[in-house]
Amino acid sequence: MNVWEYKVCYVDFRGRISAEGVEFIRQSGEHRTGFVRQYLEALGKEGWEVTGILPLGRSESSYFILKRPQSEAATNEG
């Protein structure tokens, strides 16, 4: 049986990403989608995979839901 761990990220394409109390702010001149892509690529290198996106109404914001297999050490702790 697979055991997963999850991460939920708030993404505001106007220039802010927030995940588990840590915020990332887009730099002046940095392209909006490039900013988000770089963040997602960094998470991908850590084994995270986007499994869902929940757009927030008519705003430019969404919640991104990610998952990755839970490490064996974390599984044994629970």
Image: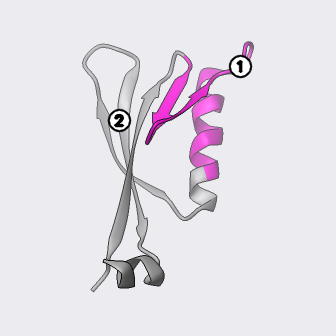
Does 9 sit above or below residue 47?
A: above
- Mark linked to residue 18: none
Does 32 sit above or below residue 20?
A: above
- Residue type, numbered disc 2: Tyr
Q: Which residues are magenta?
A: 15-42
Q: Quadrant of residue 33?
A: top right
* Residue 8 in the image, given as x and y percentages of width and height: 37, 45
- Mark linked to residue 63: 2
* Residue 6 in the image, given as x and y percentages of width and height: 36, 58
Say whether disc 2 or disc 1 marks the residue closer to the N-terminus: 1
Helix, strand or loop for disc 2? strand
Q: Residue at x 52, y 15 (%)?
A: 14
- Residue type, numbered disc 1: Gln
* Residue 22 in the image, given as x and y percentages of width and height: 52, 36
- Mark linked to residue 27: 1
Please name whichever residue, 6 or 57, is drawn nearer the observer in this view of the structure. Answer: 6
Circle 1 crowding by C-alpha within 10 Å: few under 14, some 14–19, many from 20: few
Give the quadrant of the C terminus: bottom left
Give the quadrant of the N terminus: bottom left
Query: In the picture provided, is 62 more to the left or to the right than 72?
Result: left
* Residue 42 in the image, given as x and y percentages of width and height: 64, 50
